Amino acid sequence: MTDSRGPSLTPRQDSSLRGRGRPRGVPSELVDSNDLAYTGRAIGAGRQAALVRRWGWWYQAEWRLASMKAYWTTVVGYAGLTPLLYVVAMGVGLGTLVDGASGGIGGVPYLTFVAPGLLVSTVVMSAGNEFMWPVMDGFKWGKLYFARGTSPATPGQVAAGELVAVGIRMAAEATLFWLVLVLLGATDPAWSWLMIPIATLGGMALGAPIMAFSATREDEGFEFSMIQRFVLMPMFLFAGTFYPLETMPAYLQWIGWISPMWHGTQLSRAVSFGLPLGGAEVALHVGFLVALLAVGATLAVRSFRRRLTR
Amino acid sequence: MPVIEARELTKTYGELRAVDAISFEVSPGESFGLLGPNGAGKSTTMRMIGGTSLRSSGRLLVNGLDPEVNGPEVRASLGVVPQQDNLDNELRTRDNLIMYGRYFGLPYRYLRPRADELLEFAQLTEKAGEKVDNLSGGMKRRLTIARALVNEPRILLLDEPTTGLDPQARHILWDRLFRLKEQGVTLIVTTHFMDEAEQLCDRLVVMDHGRIVAEGSPADLIRRFSTREVLEVRFGSDRNAALVDRLRAFADRIEPLPDRVLLYTDDGERALEAVRHAGLTPLTSLVRRSSLEDVFLRLTGRSLID
């Protein structure tokens, strides 16, 4: 039993605690605790709700972007340094070898061939990571999604805001990567800026289903490491990033077909150096990515709703 | 019109009836408590009020609106202090208030001065630029309460507001809550501390296993379910049980606990004298006023805190 025998100290009698905490320099007339609860300055609950019904997804995105500021050096470093490293390794090192032996791939130097794939896969990989541990953190460690849940925002808006924020980050990362490629002469800027939306779409197409999955996890098991090793890595290595998918044996080509990286890379090659793609092929690649994003986003909204209204 | 109206409110998880057909009303400006041990269904009830837990059956209206239909409207009128702090550890103290306020569609020009006011109220002005990680437990709790006030809600839901805090931090927090009450904020508090319930609540329901077992003001509940005073006697753990039958004659009701025996009577001193007179000399004895803890013991046969 709780001991209740001590002298009862009601809050009102506890005069030593009253009035403390007003810092030096803040005039007391500015802080009137009598109207602290409602100053009347805030917009009313009805108006708050109306705004959130419309913009709740953006408020969530705003927060996620603000919290990315904490690791923006990583974001910039990753997006800026990765292309430099790859371009030196692939272009100067491997590229010299390939170009010397065969005169490039499909009529273009190896660096030109590999650059769009590197851009797309870098963006897709980081999208995948943004939707694993950060989502677990939102539900389990920091529980910030539950804090969002108590605001007027709906669970669906929380999920949508996360997708939008990561989409913005992906677009920024792709832009930076593209600029480096342009500076190094690895791509023709005329149309290749379209790689930015393509890579972003590719990242979201993979990220949304991963997000839906992460939102169902109660604990961080081995799943995330497994996804990294057995989903992201094979996609990177076997999905035609470094060589045309057709050079793979037929029984391995399916990895490319189901990989958002391959679909994004093919589109990027078309806009970067003019890889010939028919209208049907373009439609197939775009359609696959959009469909994956749509299914992933729908499932993610559903997992968020379940988790936040249990 | 009541600000909260629950009728046969029920939440089941599979076989478990976490909240079992409870009904209650809360009037504007009232300070209403849900008292009960862990697992009594208090937090689930709170979450259903905010629409963050979907009810299995029953009716629930907050300001006349169903939280499952008008979730955004209901939550815009609530301030929620969850059982576990979920502050943003990446952000600084003041930014936590501002970013949370953004979730209510509030503009920065409103939020910046509001954040300063709330920091002042929470006695955290000097910690405005501090990372949340560096705040003490009591400070985090006060920041969570300040955060809940950012949208100027008329109803504040406080789930176990002082659990895990030291006595001084609790008193500071109660003082802050009392001020809000004075300003007409409706407080809904869950607690398993009877002293907290006595301090803060005008009226409360005692919950156990998802059901409401009693309802009333703290004084009213004590009057109805306990005697004015309680005599606590200890004879040593092996003798307590043996003497229960003999002690029964000296009290209206008797409650043997493992470490002591509680004798419920209107005059504790007189009962103690009578016990001594009968030749039973306790090792220690204490006369005190009845509390909600005694009410709970009477209603459920168990202590609030196991």
Image: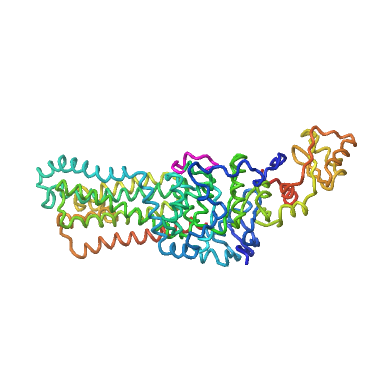
Task: From this view, report whether residue B19 is shown above or below residue A3.
Answer: below
Name which residue lies at 14% across and 53% down: A188
Residue B253 lies, in percent from the top left, at 82, 47
Q: Position of residue A23 (x, y in %)?
A: 50, 42
Q: How many marks?
A: 0
Q: Is residue A39 left or right of residue B193?
A: left
| Residue A300 placement: quadrant | bottom left
Task: Specify whether residue A284 is in view.
Answer: yes
Residue B15 shows in the view? no
- Residue closer to the observer: B49 or A228: B49
* Magenta-highlighted residues: B128-139
Depth check: give the residue in front, A229 or A168.
A168
Residue A74, image x, y percentages: 31, 43
Determine whether, in the image, residue B297 is placed left or right of residue A113. Answer: right
B133 part of magenta stretch? yes
Q: Residue at x 65, y 60 (%)?
A: B22
B284 is higher (above) or lower (below) than B69: above
Q: Position of residue B81 (x, y in %)?
A: 54, 51
Residue B295 lies within the magenta run: no
Residue occupying the far right of the picture: B278
Quadrant (top left/top right/bottom left/bottom right) for the N terminus of chain A? top right
